[in-house]
Image (spheres, rainbow, N blue to C red):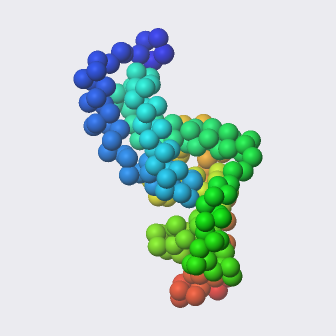
Amino acid sequence: MSEVQRKKYSDREKNDIFDNEFMPHIDSMYNFGYRLTFDEDDAKDLVQDTYLKAYRFINSFEQGTNAKAWLFRILKNSFINDYRKKSKQPAKVDYQEVETYYNSDDVDYGITTDLRVDAVKDMLGDEISNALNSLAVDFRTVIILCDLEGFTYEEMAKILDIPIGTVRSRLHRARNLLKEKLRSYAQNMGYKTDEEE
């Protein structure tokens, strides 16, 4: 169906599509956003932006198709666009916040923490989360979409806007990278690995 031929939904139909087809996926959208950004607030902003765009462009959504895949594609594109914008901007520091912290009595100068590690430490399992989060964003994305969200290769190809062969090879490579990162963890947990057989 071409853009011109798409049905114009009434306000009631738009609200019905939004409530019944889009909103049930909000938790999955947040989880995907969080895995991409490593930040709760950024993930919430990304989900909010995705749902605003979904409602704004709801006439380009064909009712009865895969709403979850459509939303994931919007979220992924928003993440990429935001990432590009941020990467071109110089880093920003709130010096007032830094000064207040270092002038307080609570400061421990010997400790520097990685907030991304702290944020995900109680979720999927420390070793697994750390291994997944250490993958490049392209590999991390295919693992999340396939193994955590259950999308098919065809759906992933549409979401990521890449050929299905690329999806398969990227997923294969991502799983192998994850397997290598988790090999010693698996051995410590008592699982036999390929090296031991």
What residue appears at the point 39 percent right and 29 percent down from the top-left corner?
55
Which corner quadrant of the image does residue 98 belong to? bottom right
**Is 86 situated left or right of 155 in this image?**
right
What residue appears at the point 58 percent right and 38 percent down from the top-left corner?
77
Indicate whether 188 appears above or below 119.
below
User: Whole-percent x and y of residue 196?
Assistant: 64, 86
User: Whole-percent x and y of residue 74?
Assistant: 51, 36
What residue appears at the point 62 percent right and 41 percent down from the top-left corner?
82
**Is 181 situated left or right of 60 in this image?**
right
Indicate whether 134 appears above or below 73.
below
User: Whole-percent x and y of residue 119?
Assistant: 52, 67
Of residue 186 and residue 196, the one placed in the foreground of this image is 186
Indicate whether 106 appears above or below 139.
below
In the rendered image, which quarter contains the C terminus?
bottom right
Which corner quadrant of the image does residue 76 belong to? top right
Q: Is residue 159 among what the camera can see? A: no
- For the image shown, how many numbered marks are present on the structure? 0
Which corner quadrant of the image does residue 117 belong to? bottom right
Q: Is residue 68 among what the camera can see? A: yes
User: Whole-percent x and y of residue 157?
Assistant: 57, 40
